[in-house]
Image (spheres, grey):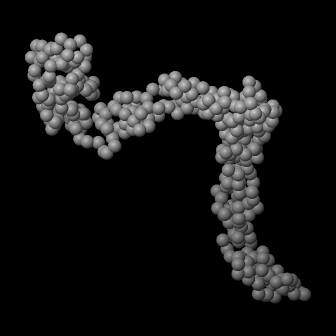
Amino acid sequence: MKPLKWAACVWLAGAAACVFPGSIVVRDGGDAQTDVARADADPVDTTTDSVDTNAVDRVRPPADGDDVSLDTTPIVDAFDTFAPVDVPTDDGTGGDIVLSDSPCAPGLTRCIGACIDTRSSLSNCGSCGSACPARPGSAAVCLGGVCTIVCNANLGDCDADRTNGCETSLTTPANCGLCRLACASGTPMCVPTSGTTYACAAGCTAGVVCTPGNPCATGSTVCMGGVTTCAPTGNRAVGSLCTGGVCNGAGNCVACTPGATCARTNVCEIGRIDCASGGPTCVFAGNQPPSTPCPTGTCDGVGSCVSTACVLPLVRCGTSCVDLTRDNNNCGSCGATCALGSMCADGTCSLPGLDGSMTLDAPTRDMGTGPG
């Protein structure tokens, strides 16, 4: 019996590429360049088929000179093996495909040109192309190369049949919190505990204040069919704290950080975030210190932006425009204060005489103030 000759084909870039054992040239039909591939090191099967009675050899039509069996069951026997086929990678030469058998990193398997972790891939779980199907009431997961399911909250796969998903509610006295965990006569009620879990309890008291799944909603216990549930009754007050923010009064949790710095419309005011209104509001928290830059000049310390330009003969002393020739507190220069009883005249502190004349008097200098 002759050795088998199998061609392995892949569909790449809209064209079929086929490789026969020992072939080294492949054309993809998409350009004029030739794809180059390495021949596999593994030899083609040369073992003669044994005579079988329950298997049919996977061969091509007799016109190719291969053997034909009259078996009817399409089973491949142990002698019909052949060398592995290279998988495609791009050689970067303008569309040609090079079939490469370069290995993947440890723990990964090559699946149609990509290295995949078949231990966790939902589309290639355990082997290439083995996708984990979706099941009712659950999420599909691939664990260790085996498809399994994770049940949604308060649902269980109590019949151990993954094909129908998680079919059983775990909020009833027959399956309270766990599959087949039935509530005994002393604790006949299945009631909600912390989070979304349920447990058996002695009884149910309707109307007890509880917190439903929405942290910005109010709730009250309801007893029905041996099950206690927390039914929403309304919304929590505006400004009530919730995870990461406050409730807005409409059942929504709005992100808000009280006390955080914020920008006021008046740039000479300091703003802080307030959450009492059900959302972030920038409220007044004081004035910017004097000389803080503002669009038209500097802040005056009381919430106003004053111009830094003074009209002659006025000059700026601190945050004010003054006349150095007549200002008793800035006589001749900023901060030069005339003594009690003296006056600033022409920029000089003077004492008035009985005849109306002026006598020079040295001003007191405030060393902490200067022209600005």
Residue at x 15% of width, y 27% of height: 20
Rendered position, 261 above or below 359: above
Q: How many marks?
A: 0
Q: Is residue 191 visible?
A: no
Give residue 93's position: percent from left, percent from top.
21, 37
Give residue 130's position: percent from left, percent from top.
37, 29
Residue 306, by quadrant, is bottom right
The answer to whether residue 94 is left or right of residue 294 is left
Residue at x 76% of width, y 37% of height: 210
Residue 133, by quadrant, is top left
Give residue 293's position: percent from left, percent from top.
64, 62
Give residue 64's position: percent from left, percent from top.
11, 16
Q: Quadrant of the N terminus?
A: top left
The answer to whether residue 151 is left or right of residue 350 is left
Nearer to the camera, 89 or 4: 4
Instruction: Specify the farthest residue to the front.
Output: 185
The answer to whether residue 75 is left or right of residue 161 is left
Q: Is residue 51 visible?
A: yes
Residue at x 39% of width, y 38% of height: 119
